[in-house]
Image: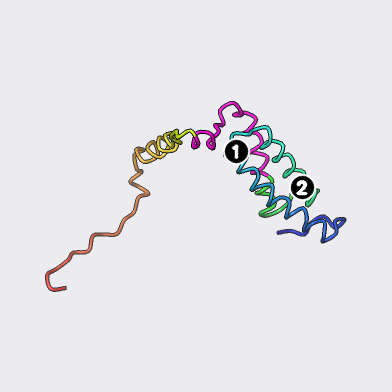
Amino acid sequence: MPNPDPGLTAEVATTLISQVRADLKRLKWFLWHGNVFRALTTVEGITIDLETLHPNDEPSGSQNKLLKAVRELDGYLRANAARIPNYGERRRCGETISTAFTESTVNQVISKPIDRTTWRHADPVPVTAGQ
């Protein structure tokens, strides 16, 4: 991980990193329970903390990946807020939590024809008696 903003003390940087970790756990809980408003508020907080740690426009390495992923998640949540289910409530009501969308995607990927020019396999090894 690159060094945080030189203007931050080590104590402040450590606190921000701990806060980001805690916020990511909270974010998972909010999403599981369909609380998009609190999830978006948490995503905004995480974004601010990450930008505070690395105020330059292009953080490097894993920091850049995390910040990019958090920003993409923010966009996804805003675009799909009405479709985020409350899995906690569904579970308490005994409803099935469907994986149909995921299974459908996997089936589509599996059913695509294989490009035989890039598909490689070992030649079958003959098995003889006594070996």
Q: Is residue 95 above or below residue 2?
A: above
SS class, disc 1:
helix
| Residue 124: percent from left, percent from top | 23, 60
Magenta span: predominant SS is helix
Please, which residue is most extreme toward the front here? Answer: 93
Q: Amino acid at mark 2?
A: Asp
Q: Amino acid at mark 1?
A: Leu
Please tell me whether residue 81 belongs to the stretch shown in magenta. Answer: yes
Could you tell whether 86 is left or right of 41 in the image?
Answer: left
- Image quarter hosting the N terminus: bottom right
User: Which stretch appears magenta?
Assistant: 68-92
**In this rendering, position of residue 127 left or right of residue 28:** left
- How packed mark 2 is, by other alpha carbons closer than 10 Å (few <14, some 14-19, many 20 or more), is some
Is 97 placed left or right of 128 in the picture? right
Q: Position of residue 70 (x, y in %)?
A: 66, 42
Q: CA distance from mark 1 to mark 2?
A: 20 Å
Label 1 Cα crowd, 10 Å radius (few <14 / some 14-19 / many 20+) = many
Residue 79 shown in magenta: yes
Which residue has dot 1 on it? Answer: 31
Q: Residue furthest bottom?
A: 130
Taking the spot 75% from the left edge, 42% from the top edge, the residue there is 45
Whether the residues at callouts 1 and 2 have beta carbons within 8 Å, the answer is: no
Which comes sooner in the sequence, label 1 or label 2? 1
Q: Position of residue 73 (x, y in %)?
A: 63, 38
Q: Residue at x 69, y 52 (%)?
A: 63
In this view of the protein, which residue sits in the foreground, 18 or 33? 33
